[in-house]
Amino acid sequence: MKTAQQEIDERTNLTSSNKFELLLFRLGTDSALGQSELFGINVFKIREIVAMPAITPIVGATPHSLGVVNLRGQVIPVLDLPSIVGCTPKTGLNIMLVTEFARTTQAFAVESVEDIARLDWNQVMSAESSGSAGKLVTSIARLDGNTDNTRLAQVLDVEAILQMVSPSDEHQVDPQKVGSRLILKPGTIVLAADDSFVARSLIEQELKVLQAPYQMTKSGKEAWDRLNALADEAEAEGKTVHDKVALVLTDLEMPEMDGFTLTRNIKQSARLSGLPVVIHSSLSGSANEDHVRSVGADGYVAKFVAEDLANTLRKVLLP
């Protein structure tokens, strides 16, 4: 039998092979077809799973808020996830998923938990590229591989959900806090990669405030392909990729290729290895930060505080 530490180490090491684990759960029947679909959240965002405890309703709470729970001395807000995504539980809200991401702790009420699926990121399609774009879904996971009749699960954009339900002033781009423009080598850009619609919007706002030219991509693979295309263009002009790209800013969780793999590919490429890479992620914790360093990233910043991101970019770009 594996020890708890062995399971943690094994789960963390999945990122070395472009793999991850997805917690699968159900929210009830949807309003469109009356079916009970599978949804997923990256296991790294789940702190614990508990049977639904007693909830204390809060007077004047925002829509979709069920109230708060006292879990081992910590008061945690509980959100009604089925109502947020438009589902109706058939058997009630039975399970609470306690999550930690983007510097916050909150719980989501769900109908049932099904399984934990170990997947390769190439089994995950961008919701936008697959024609199923929705602001609350980042991607579609093919659970049984890439076969025609595979089961599908919708990977929820829990950062977007949290921002929608509980807007935070911290997640705004304030020019006063962001500070002066970013100094880049003339002719270069920041190449950014993030699969979240909300995250891309915030990153674009910030880079505009910083007066930094940029190109935005929606996955690690798209960023990798774009980097190689820019390197090819530079070589055709008798230049190097450093004349085209000043810095790569990447999320960790992305369909097709995650940020760990993208960073490792860049650092192991003869013509790209000198490019600075900053990882910008809602995943936190020492295990993730240690792995960020192991793949050679030049900086790490937790989502989303505009001032912290600007300061990290300036630090990495210092000559």
Image (cartoon, rainbow, N blue to C red):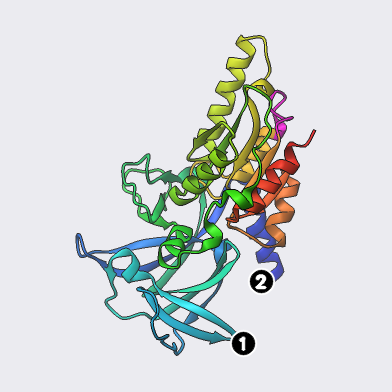
Disc 1 is placed on an element classified as loop
The quadrant in which the N terminus is found is bottom right
Q: Which mark is residue 289?
A: none
Q: Which residue is mark 1?
A: 73
> Residue drawn 51% across and 46% down?
254
Q: CA distance from mark 2 to mark 1?
A: 32 Å
Q: Main secondary structure of the magenta part?
A: loop
Q: Mark 2 vs mark 1: which is more N-terminal?
A: 2
> Residue drawn 44% across and 87% down?
55
Residue type at the position of mark 2: Met
Q: Which residues are magenta?
A: 267-275
Can see residue 251? Answer: yes
Relative image position of residue 54 (x, y in whole percent): 45, 90
Residue lying farthest right? 319
Relative image position of residue 280 (x, y in whole percent): 61, 49
Q: Which residue is mark 2?
A: 1
